[in-house]
Image (spheres, grey):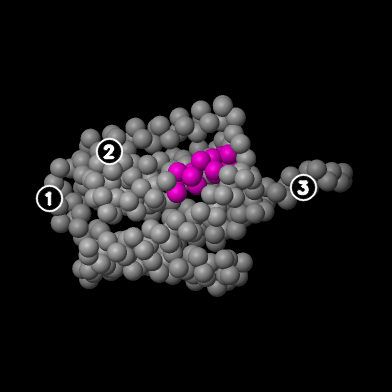
Amino acid sequence: MDWMKIGSAILLTMFIFMVFPRVRQELKHGKKGSQQEWMGALALLGGVALFVWLLMQSV
Amino acid sequence: MQQPTPVIERARGQSIEINKVLKNTYLLLSATFIFSAVMATVSTLLYMPPMTYLICIGLSFALIWLALPRTANSGAGILVVFAITGLMGFGIGPLLNHYLAMSNGTQIVATALAGTGLIFFALSGYALMTKKDFSFMGGFLMVGMLVVLVAALANIFLNISGLSLAISSVVILIMSGFILYDTSRMINQPESANYIVMTVSLFLNIFNIFVNLLHLLGFASDD
């Protein structure tokens, strides 16, 4: 295993430790969205996915 | 002259606060992007080794973790933001050299740059215009981020190219969600949105979209 892989693994493990407390906090105290709010947000993310797919076709 | 009512005063106060946070965040974000682009150019011209990427990202995250929370409410916070974004810009040099060495490398980098800019302006502009509250996405985005990090860690050992592409696609979607979440936070909770922290947060969203879009476009170009 090369140094890049070892370094990446250490960095990702650090990120996981950084993110984990915020995940717990958001799940406990985060606001819950309505179905309408989720549909709106997912439509936007769907638009992003479509745009990325179009970019991939263009290169 | 009639005295304004407290409700109007409060609304005006909040509006001024929102404008201040937005103006400061976007100004600092623009400045950090120029600085980061200069650092990326220097790193590209110096042909830095691939390890530079890991070292710079590691150092910038150490700053985010240790220095940013202590300096976010002072002038030193601005220096920390420039250090973080400068390191990330410098770190991206070897990655840019890798893609620029491809036959259509310039086109890939330019497309990734334009695509990232368009995604950011469209989503941030949408959140600013509609003033919708996207704070409900917080839990979903954080869990998504955790799953992606665990999958990326597993893929270092598994080395599956399909999984690597799937991770890049999901990261772009999660970071797009974070752009909505962060922008709406500046509008709906301006009192809790520190412009220095918001700048770093938006910078990370854009940086991650750019890096992962480069990966997808590099794969799609079949070089």
Which residue was labeled with disc 1?
B103
Position of residue A41 in the picture relative to residue B33 (left or right): right
The amino acid beneath tag 3 is Arg
Q: Looking at the image, can residue B217 be seen?
A: no
Label 1 and label 3: CA atoms lie apart by 58 Å
- Taking the spot 28% from the left edge, 34% from the top edge, the residue there is A54
**Residue B149 appears anywhere in the view:** yes
* Numbered label attached to residue B10: 3
Query: What amino acid is found at the position of numbered circle 2 in the picture?
Result: Leu
Q: Which mark is residue A55?
A: 2
Residue drawn at (74%, 45%) of the image: B11
> What chain is tagged by disc 2?
A
Q: Does the stretch in magenta take in B138?
A: yes
| Left or right of A29, for residue B205 | left
Q: Secondary structure at mark 3?
A: helix
Give the residue at x 56% y 31%: A37
The amino acid on which the numbered mark 1 sits, given as a three-letter code, is: Ser
**Residues rendered magenta in the picture:** B134-146
Mark nearer the viewer, 1 or 3: 1
Question: In what element is the residue under mark 1?
Answer: loop
Q: Main secondary structure of the magenta part?
A: helix
